[in-house]
Image: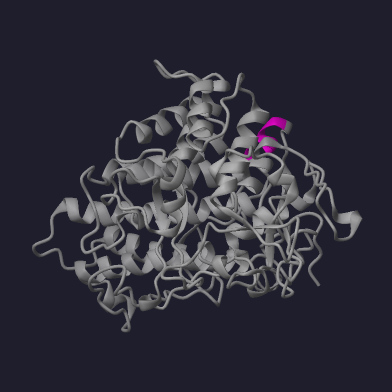
Amino acid sequence: MKKIFLSIAVLALALTSCDDFLTKEPPMDQSDELALSTFSGLDGATAGNYRTVISWYGASFPLTFDVMCGNGMVGPVNTGRMRMEPAWNFTPTSELGLWASAYNAILGCNKVLTAINEGNFNRDGVTDEQINNIKAENLFLRALAYFDLVRVYAQPYGYIKEKGITGTEALGVPIVLEDDLSARPVRNTVAEVYENLIIPDLQEAERLMSTSYVRAGVKDMVATVTTPVIQALMARVYLTHEDWQLAADYANKVIRNGRFRLLSGNNYVSMWDGSLDVAPQSGSETIFEVYVSQSDGSSSSLGDYLTAPETAGGAGYGDVRVSNDLLSLYEESDVRLTGLTKTNAQYPGYRWSTKYPGKGGQLAYNNVPIIRISEMYLTRAEALYRGATISGVTALDDLNQVATSRGASAYSQVNIDNIFNERRKEFLFEGQVYFDMKRLQRSLTRTDYDLDPLTKDIDFPSYRWAFPIPENDILYNSNLVQNPGYQSK
């Protein structure tokens, strides 16, 4: 693998307290070398690396993409937030913020992985299995960060491959394996990021992790990496990489694992408000999530932004409502409409989401799902439709498993449009619609849009499907090439 290093001054290994995530975590307030000189230090640093993921999934990262792609629209009492996103008015000086957050996570993972690979820690009383498990966790977290980076700051893999695109338009993000403040990295191609890092990291993580491993002292079992979590992300990655058989195989592994199941009716609604009583990682829909809690200092803005405003009988800001374009896709019997959206007489014609109601009514504290079992059914459905084979399973059956579990009618046929629409309904405000549209090379058309009509529809292809690299990083590193269509000053 080609090694290149990142030099971004803002990156630091910031490990916050995780008392509510783990029963205890060694503080990392000394030098990296000292902090990573013991297995307990490596384990604590790994716990800290989980917390870095909150900086994008716990923020507006999922919401941004739904607002961009027509699932959400600015609410009638908007506080001024989410005005740039529906118009796609991103610039190198005003962009998503993922770049620094994800590379911060990568830096933390790299430090732990380097210490493990070089053996720079006291191994007394520590088994190979223990070491392999935390190595697998860091490989997974690094792969997740790179996967999100390359999906946001580059054109989609399938489009580049299909069109034979080369040059700047084929660039992904820098592969960073070490911390070198004197280096100025170049951007690797999209193919290199997938094939030299994301996929190998996940493959190694799956190989290393014990199938029975669960991080010690964890209160929220689905907020940590386990074997099915790795396999679920592999299914998503392979679908995006257009490896249909592998996407089907890995989705199938997770479905047949038996730990996760589709819920229906009130049970599905209760899953979101936390009132569903299920045994940890047994009967849950959620495979992997970000854990957010007031006691550890973390928070999520999703509940505040999405919940109806106080003037509409809610307690949120009401910045984003569910779009009429999306609402038109739901049947009246669909629990995703009846149980997870809310109307108010004061604002007729509008609905707000109730997916993130907050813990104990505190809207700032919501666990944020990253992967759910319904995605595995829809991934397997699409992969089967595109030519993969799994004995005894059909694409139509998988599609209908999701639809009927939510109270919707069964489909009579399977095609990409039906799969896309089901994904759109299922993953409202989970941030998936943008990535689905991008990999499927679908242009965006919106009816429910009351901003500048010149920004209503976004064609594919367009330079706008790749976000701009932050200007500060372009200025700091002369080897970092900006995406076409954006001018850094």
Residue 161 in magenta stretch: yes
Residue 5 at x, y percent in the picture: 51, 63
Q: How many marks?
A: 0
**Which residue is rendered at x = 38% and y = 40% of the image?**
231
Say whether residue 68 is visible.
Answer: yes
**With respect to residue 424, does 72 lie above or below?**
below
Residue 363 at x, y percent in the picture: 51, 71
Would residue 339 be found to the left or right of residue 324 on screen? left
Direction top: furthest residue: 392
Residue 364 at x, y percent in the picture: 50, 72
Direction left: furthest residue: 125
**Which residue is rendered at x = 77% and y = 52% of the image?**
464
Residue 325 in magenta stretch: no
Residue 228 at x, y percent in the picture: 34, 42
**Which residue is rendered at x = 16% and y = 52% of the image?**
128
**With respect to residue 193, does 377 lie above or below?**
above
Would residue 215 be found to the left or right of residue 144 on screen? left
Direction bottom: furthest residue: 30
Would residue 72 be found to the left or right of residue 128 on screen? right
Would residue 68 be found to the left or right of residue 424 on screen? right
What's the magenta region?
157-162
